[in-house]
Amino acid sequence: QVQLVESGGGLVQPGGSLTLSCVASGIIFSGNTMDWYRQAPGKQREMVARITPGGTTYHADSVRGRFAISRDNAKNTVYLQMNNLKFEDTAVYYCNRVPPISVGAETYWGQGTQVTVSS
């Protein structure tokens, strides 16, 4: 059974840091490119970081230099280290593989983890 479990979110002040984790099961994790997405209230979900099986990374302009994606294939886990957080980073953060996991005709998403940046 496919499952993505995100964790590590919380309430943090501007300039603070958080590390998110996503544990994947039911897929061959080591062979998949993995993405972190986020969805802010009233906005569409956007991809913010990507890591290939070989460890090549991509970060969206909005987070480049502040966020860093990494992975531990032995733990089936992808991480997102977030530094110098800003108000606009407030969102629910999700992970998924590339292409996103489908269950029937629907895209599967985990429950996500809430990140709130507030003073």
Image (cartoon, rainbow, N blue to C red):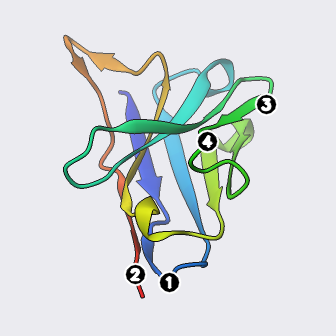
Identity of the amino acid at label 1? Gln
Q: CA distance from mark 3 to mark 4?
A: 19 Å
Q: Are marks 1 and 2 in contact (CB under 8 Å)?
A: yes
Q: CA distance from mark 4 to mark 2?
A: 22 Å
Identity of the amino acid at label 2? Ser
Q: Is residue 107 above or below residue 91?
A: above
In the rendered image, the quadrant that contains the N terminus is top left
Q: Is residue 1 above or below residue 105?
A: below
Q: Nearer the viewer, residue 54 or 65?
A: 65
Task: Locate residue 54, reporting x and y percent.
Answer: 80, 24
Query: Going from the N terminus, do you reach mark 3 or mark 2 first?
Result: 3
Q: Is residue 8 above or below residue 77?
A: below
Q: Is residue 12 above or below residue 52?
A: below
Q: Residue furthest bottom?
A: 119
Q: Residues within 10 Å of mark 2 (few under 14, many from 20)?
A: some
Identity of the amino acid at label 3? Gly
What mark, if any, has residue 61 been given in the picture?
4
